[in-house]
């Protein structure tokens, strides 16, 4: 009796596994099958799908989908749907909200894409792998979605990218900075991904150069196990050692940890003069506060990165943040349109910028919009047919695009940024005064280069 | 005789003991190697232990709520961590109001006591309301039902606070007088830690007195031993259970303020991990046992603070503090292998078995 019950359960479980595996494995061949069925003649367009679609762009000759990955059809009176996937709740909400505001302003400025209205839809990526996975599964199920701006956090991106790429929806992030995401050896199912944020190979090296140049020789790092923090501190450590400095400790905490004092006691025993912790708001605030309370760390220069470059971090860290350094995109290097963007931002949301990536998000939206206008086939009835592969190809072949964050040219692996990193110093711990810039009165103030 | 022994000592038990012994050896080897390397001074170790005690006394205060409710109702009140969060939030509002008016800096002791009392009172009220609405109607239901309800209540409280006060982190005010360290018996302790430890000890003693010496405390003990018999003896069971939630909630609310004093951040999800850890502490000490919760909380706090440095460092594991949580639950497993009823759980086991 017992044995047979076990057998039944085993069979059910196997069946469950098979059923669960099936839909996951089939989408790519299935969409390929559909296009093959409707387009029997396009055997050779698979590799050059982007070109054929874009040359056929404005002719309105045919409204059939020739794209190997499939198409998004926008009805005559329907808006073009663009998605965002950002962290808009929790401790790191300002990081995602800031990018979301950038996207919304870009959509307002643009007004229409290919003479269609713009509709923004979004999901919260929660700044975690689980959140990214869930958000991507929801968004990839939307057949009207043309492209996605996101995610906010690299850990979320790692989970979301394969899902979006399997659905063929191009994804462009404004704030993912982990080097792995655009590395030359990235997995094949990252093909649809690119970013306007800098690569941390640049940010980590910049911070190391600043620290070494400022006279620090013994650095310690702390990461929180996230893809972003782990890789950024490693880039920093490698560069710092290369310059001739010494890395005396590389510690790690959990993103939800609150008691950092034991870990910091360990750091203090190693005797650093510079502590770099490119982590997120909650844990970053705790490290900042508690570093002031642990004997042996009183004189150590504290430094964070762009993930905690926000007024919310000042709320979390309190007075202890005073004098702290941050590596971040260089606001003063942004294009001539940046002041106008800032003005709209402040007028629309009644706040100073909440983080460092609104301009990157603005550019990301425009890369999508330009891509859609380039490849969309306008049909006689006013509807649009947008090839997914074609859109991705058009976006990733962006060249010399004059964005707000600089002159953007995408590499083959999706690095579109024109990365300029600065180091800022917190001059006032009051979050109300947070307004990064390069003037003498700005807080935080740019101190390098 | 031999047959008897074989029946009593099954293969699983032996395997458990072998695993336990191996783990114990690993722990000892790690400890000895760390001490031989001698990277840390005596002051570092005392610091680590003090950090552990202050964190552990907060765990203990929360764990008491879990253990008292378990003792009396045989259910795990998973919403208890969120009562703790609510206490910290209420404390935050009062403290920042005092901070704005300048009262906090002028009358530090008075305002700290007032903040703690308000937080404890509100949290206690919430716990009582929770019991009345969510748990009392289910008292005769199967045991799984109130457990699920508790998880639902936990989500409800969390997301109610999220909706009311937003998801961002709020920073507690930091009075100047609380910064820095004081020297106690030659040990340098942060002032906030000293306050936390002293307050926790006072509350633990008060609870001990309440449970052991007062009429109400004895009634609670009687109800937790046998509800029906207690009712026959003229004890108001509903009232006893309500008082249990009240006391547990008050302790959690006060713990919320103490926690915020140490870590100075409040947000809607902050109750989850301390709640989970306190639950672990309660099980570690022997769930249902009040002294066990205190011991378990302190043990867990010290273990989290000390063991990554003491054990894992010697084993050559890099960045050991990210394994802090893993270590805490690993300890739980280790203790449960050797003492399935927890450190002090023996009396309960014989009584309820």
Image (spheres, rainbow, N blue to C red):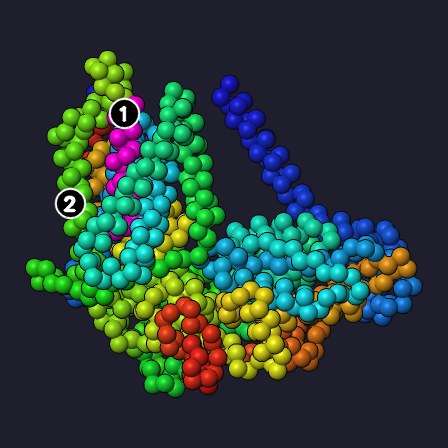
Say which of marks 1 and 2 sits in front.
1
Q: Quadrant of residue A60?
A: bottom right
Circle 2 crowding by C-alpha within 10 Å: few under 14, some 14–19, many from 20: few
Residue B250 lies in magenta, yes or no? yes
A268 sits to left or right of B155: left
Q: Quadrant of residue B247?
A: top left
Residue topped by disc 1: B239
Q: Quadrant of residue B279?
A: top left
- Mark 1 or mark 2: whose residue is earlier in sequence: 2
* Image location (x, y in percent) of residue B130: 37, 33
Say if residue A410 shows up in the picture. yes
Please report the residue visible at 35 percent of the width from the left and 65 percent of the height from the top: A317
Residue topped by disc 2: B202
Q: Chain of mark 1?
A: B
Segment tinted magenta in the rendering: B238-258
Quadrant location, the N terminus of chain B: top left
Q: Observer-nearest residue: B225 or A431?
A: A431
Circle 1 crowding by C-alpha within 10 Å: few under 14, some 14–19, many from 20: few
Please report the residue visible at 51 percent of the width from the left and 76 percent of the height from the top: A329
Q: Chain of mark 2?
A: B
Say if residue A302 shows up in the picture. no
Look at the numbered disc 2 and give the secondary structure of its residue: helix
Q: Which mark is residue A99?
A: none
Quadrant location, the C terminus of chain B: top left
Check contact, mark 1 vs mark 2: CB within 8 A.
no
Q: Observer-nearest residue: A291 or A201?
A: A291
* Image location (x, y in percent) of residue A196: 60, 71
B327 sits to left or right of A234: left
Calculate the distance from the C-alpha at mark 1 to the C-alpha at mark 2. 25 Å
B28 sits to left or right of B137: left
Q: Observer-nearest residue: A326 or B301?
A: A326
């Amino acid at each position: 009796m017992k044995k047979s019950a076990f057998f039944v359960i085993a069979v059910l479980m196997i069946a469950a596994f098979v059923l669960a595996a099936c839909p996951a494995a089939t989408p790519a061949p299935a969409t390929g099958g559909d296009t093959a069925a409707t387009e029997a003649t396009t055997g050779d367009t698979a590799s050059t799908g982007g070109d054929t679609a874009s040359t056929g762009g404005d002719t309105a000759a045919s409204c059939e989908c020739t794209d190997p990955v499939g198409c998004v059809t926008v009805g005559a009176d329907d808006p073009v749907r663009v998605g965002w996937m950002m962290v808009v709740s929790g401790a790191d909400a300002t990081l995602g909200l800031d990018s979301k505001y950038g996207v919304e302003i870009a959509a307002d400025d643009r007004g229409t894409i290919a003479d269609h209205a713009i509709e923004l839809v979004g999901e919260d990526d929660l700044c975690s792998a689980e959140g990214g996975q869930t958000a991507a599964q929801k968004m990839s199920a939307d057949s009207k979605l043309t492209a996605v701006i996101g995610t906010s956090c690299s850990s979320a991106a790692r989970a979301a990218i394969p899902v979006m790429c399997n659905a063929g929806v191009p994804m462009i992030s404004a704030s993912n900075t982990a080097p792995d995401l655009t590395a030359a050896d990235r997995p094949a199912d990252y093909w649809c991904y690119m970013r306007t944020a800098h690569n941390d190979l640049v940010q980590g090296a910049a911070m190391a150069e600043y620290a070494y140049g400022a006279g620090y020789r013994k650095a310690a790092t702390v990461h929180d196990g996230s893809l972003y923090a782990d890789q950024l501190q490693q880039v920093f450590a490698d560069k710092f050692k290369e310059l001739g400095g010494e890395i005396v400790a590389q510690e790690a905490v959990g993103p939800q940890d609150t008691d950092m004092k034991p870990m910091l006691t360990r750091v203090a025993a190693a005797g650093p003069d510079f502590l770099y912790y490119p982590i997120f708001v909650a844990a970053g605030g705790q490290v900042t506060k508690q570093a002031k309370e642990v004997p042996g760390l009183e004189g150590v220069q504290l430094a964070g990165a762009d993930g905690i470059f926000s007024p919310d971090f000042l709320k979390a860290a309190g007075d202890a943040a005073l004098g702290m350094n941050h590596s971040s995109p260089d606001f003063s290097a942004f294009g001539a349109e940046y002041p106008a963007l800032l003005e709209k931002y402040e007028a629309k949301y009644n706040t100073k910028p909440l983080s460092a990536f609104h301009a990157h998000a603005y550019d990301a939206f425009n890369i999508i919009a330009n891509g859609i206008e380039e490849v969309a086939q306008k049909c006689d009835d006013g509807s649009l047919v947008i090839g997914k592969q074609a859109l991705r190809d058009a976006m990733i072949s962006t060249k010399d695009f004059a964005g707000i964050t600089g002159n953007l040219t995408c590499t083959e692996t999706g690095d579109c940024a024109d990365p300029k990193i600065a180091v800022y110093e917190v001059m006032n711990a009051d979050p109300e005064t947070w307004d990064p810039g390069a003037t003498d009165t700005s807080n935080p103030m740019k101190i390098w280069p | 005789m031999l047959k008897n022994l074989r029946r009593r000592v099954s293969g699983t038990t032996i395997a458990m003991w072998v695993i336990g012994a191996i783990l114990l050896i690993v722990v000892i080897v790690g400890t000895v190697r760390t001490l031989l390397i001698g990277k840390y001074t005596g002051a570092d170790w005392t610091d680590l232990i003090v950090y552990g005690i202050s964190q552990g006394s907060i765990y203990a205060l929360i764990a008491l709520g879990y253990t008292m409710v378990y003792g009396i109702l045989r259910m795990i009140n998973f919403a208890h961590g969120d009562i703790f969060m609510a206490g910290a939030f209420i404390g935050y509002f009062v403290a920042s109001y005092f901070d704005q008016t300048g009262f906090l800096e002028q009358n530090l002791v008075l305002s700290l006591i007032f903040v703690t009392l308000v937080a404890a009172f509100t949290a206690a009220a919430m716990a009582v309301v929770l019991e009345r609405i969510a748990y009392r109607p289910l008292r005769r239901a199967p045991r799984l039902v109130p457990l699920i309800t508790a998880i639902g209540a936990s989500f409800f409280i969390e997301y109610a606070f999220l909706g009311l006060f937003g998801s961002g982190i709020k920073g507690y005010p930091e009075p100047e007088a609380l910064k820095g360290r004081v020297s106690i018996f030659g040990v340098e302790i942060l002032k906030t830690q000293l306050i936390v430890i002293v307050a926790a000890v006072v509350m633990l003693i008060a609870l001990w007195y309440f449970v052991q010496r007062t009429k109400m405390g004895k009634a609670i003990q009687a109800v937790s031993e046998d509800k029906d018999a207690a009712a026959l003896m003229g004890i108001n069971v509903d009232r006893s259970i309500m008082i249990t939630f009240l006391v547990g909630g008050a302790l959690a609310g006060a713990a919320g303020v103490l926690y915020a004093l140490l870590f100075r951040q409040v947000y809607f999800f902050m109750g989850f991990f301390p709640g989970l850890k306190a639950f672990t502490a309660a099980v570690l000490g022997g769930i249902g046992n009040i002294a066990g919760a205190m011991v378990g909380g302190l043990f867990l706090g010290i273990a989290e603070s000390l063991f990554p440095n003491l054990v894992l460092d010697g084993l050559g594991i890099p960045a050991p503090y990210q394994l802090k949580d893993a270590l805490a639950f690993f300890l739980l497993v280790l203790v449960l292998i050797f003492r399935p009823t927890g450190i002090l759980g023996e009396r309960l086991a014989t009584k309820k078995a």
